[in-house]
Image (cartoon, rainbow, N blue to C red):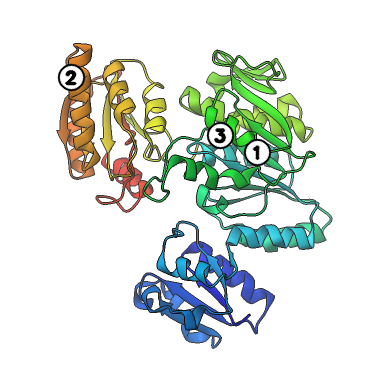
Amino acid sequence: MKATVIFGLGGEGFSTYSYLRAQSTEEAFLFVDDKPLTALSLEWQKIVSSDKLVQFLHSAEVTEVELRDCRIVKTPGIPPTHPVALLAQELQLEITSNTQLFFEYLQKNDPEIRTIGVTGTKGKSTTTALIHHVLTSAGLPALLAGNIGKPALDLVPQVDEMVHSGQRPIVILELSSHQLMDLPYSPEIAVVLDITPEHLDYYASFAEYTAAKSAICRYQSPEDLIIFNPTLQGARELAKLSPAKQLLFADTAKSDSDTALAAALDEDKVLSQGKTILSATKLPLTGRHQWLNALPSVIIGVHLGLADEQIAAALQSFRPLPHRLELVATHNEVKYYNDSQATTPEAAIAALRSFPKNSVVLIAGGSEKHVDLSAFSKEIMERGVLAVALFPPTGEAIREQIELYAGQLAKPKPDMQLVHSMPEAVQFARRYAKPNTTVLLSPACASFGIFKNYQDRGEQFRSEV
C-alpha cells in the first residue's frame, strides 16, 4: 500500500488520522478535501506543515497517479458519485471509514466487547443518549459515540484503558445512513427506529436510502438482538434482513402484533414485559413520539440485568438533547419550543401532534431535499395552526399546499408569511402568540441557505426568544 488517503477533513477525518498515526509513525498519508488548505482549520494546516509524511491535495487535483495502490478512508456524507470516489471505485481501491476501522479494531483486540447500534430517520440521538444514560446511571461501563458527535475511533483509548483494568465496555453508537453504507459489520444489539424518506438529495431513491441503513442488522448472528417497532413498515422491513432474536416495542394503541411486546407505551404508562414501571408524563420529554424513543432503553436495561426501579429512575433523570422539542423560553404564558432537528415532514408532524389543536404558531420551511411536504401541509390545516412563518424555498411550496387543503377542507387558512431571517420569523410569530399558546420551530426541512445547519437555526431561535 502506497499511502492512506483521508478523504474529507472534518471531525471524523481528524479522528481517523489521529488513530492511524498512533498505530504507525511511518505510514504515509494523502489528505484530500473539496476546500483548499487555507480554508481548513488551523489544526489541519499544522499537521500538513509538521508531518513530513503527509501531502495535501484539493479534490479537483486528484488523479489516478496519486490514488493508485492507496486505501481510501472516506468521510460519511461524501456521496459515492463524487469524482474522487468514482475514481477510487474504478481503480478497485479499498474504501473504508472511521466506523469500519473501529469495528475492525474491536474484532482484532477484543471481540467480546458488546456493541449497541441505533439507526432510524429521526429519534436516533435521543434514543442513543437514553440508552447510554440508563446504563451509566446503573454503573455499567457504557461509552457513547457515532453520529451523536464523537467519532467511533475516538473511543479507542478509553476502550483500551477499561479492558486493561478488567472492565468489559459496552459501546453505544448512533449510526447514520452514511456511516452504515458499505459497512460490513453489524452491532450485537441493533435498534431500528422509523425509516422514512430523507437525504433524497444524496440518494437516488428512498429504496437506496433504506438499503444504505441495512448494515445495522444484515451481518448479525442468531445470538444477537434486534429491537424495533413492528407497527413501522420501514423498521419491519429492515428487521427481516437479520437472523437475530427480535425484541419488540410499540404504542399499544397501534400494535396488533402476535408477539408479546418487550416494552410498550400504554396510554400514558411505560410498560416493561407487560408491567408498568412509570408514568410517561414523568419523562422529561415532550411528545408521544419521544416517549416511544425511551422504550429501547427499557428493553436493553432489562436485557443487561437492570431492575425496573433503576431503569425508571434513570429515565426520569435524563436531560433532553437540544433542538429536539426543547422548551427554550416561556414569556407571558407563551411557550417557545425549539425543534430545529425536525428536518423531515414526519418529524414535524409528530411535533405538531404533541400540542393541543388550535394552539400552535409555527415556524417552518427551509432548503430543498426533494421530499413530499403535502402530508405536513395538510397536518397544519387539520391541527388548526394559528399562523405560519415560512422560510424559502420550500416555504413557498408549503404555503401553496396549505391554500389547496384549505379549499378542500372548506376551512380558513392560517395567516402565512415568507420570512428570510430568524428575527423576522420570531417577530411574525409573536403577533399571533397569545397566553396558553405555543410558538414552535419545527421546520420539516433542512436548514442550509439562511442557516449554517440545524444547530445554528435552533441557536438563533433560542437567542431571539
Residue 193 numbered mark, or none:
3
Which circle marks residue 293 in the picture? Answer: none
Amino acid found under the numbered disc labelled 1: Leu
Looking at the image, residue 382 sits to the left or right of residue 89; the answer is left
The image shows residue 301, relative to residue 82, as above or below, that is above
Disc 2 to disc 1, C-alpha distance:
45 Å
Q: Secondary structure at mark 2?
A: loop
Residue placed farthest to the right in the image? 166
Residue beneath the point at 78% across and 62% down: 109
Give the side of residue 385 with respect to residue 126, left or right.
left
Which of 392/375 is in front?
375
Q: Amino acid at mark 3?
A: Leu
Residue 179 located left or right of residue 134: left
Instruction: Quarter of the image for the N terminus: give it.
Output: bottom right
> Which numbered marker is on residue 241?
1
User: Which of the two labelled residues, at mark 3 and mark 1, occupies the earlier sequence position?
Assistant: 3
Instruction: Tell me if I can see residue 426 in this picture.
Output: no
Earlier residue among tags 2 and 1 = 1
Residue 413 numbered tag: 2
Work out how far the residue at label 2 is from the one at label 3, CA to CA, in angstroms.
Answer: 34 Å
Residue at 76% of width from left, 58% of height from top? 107
Q: Nearer the viewer, residue 202 or 419?
A: 202
Q: Position of residue 35 (x, y in %)?
A: 36, 71
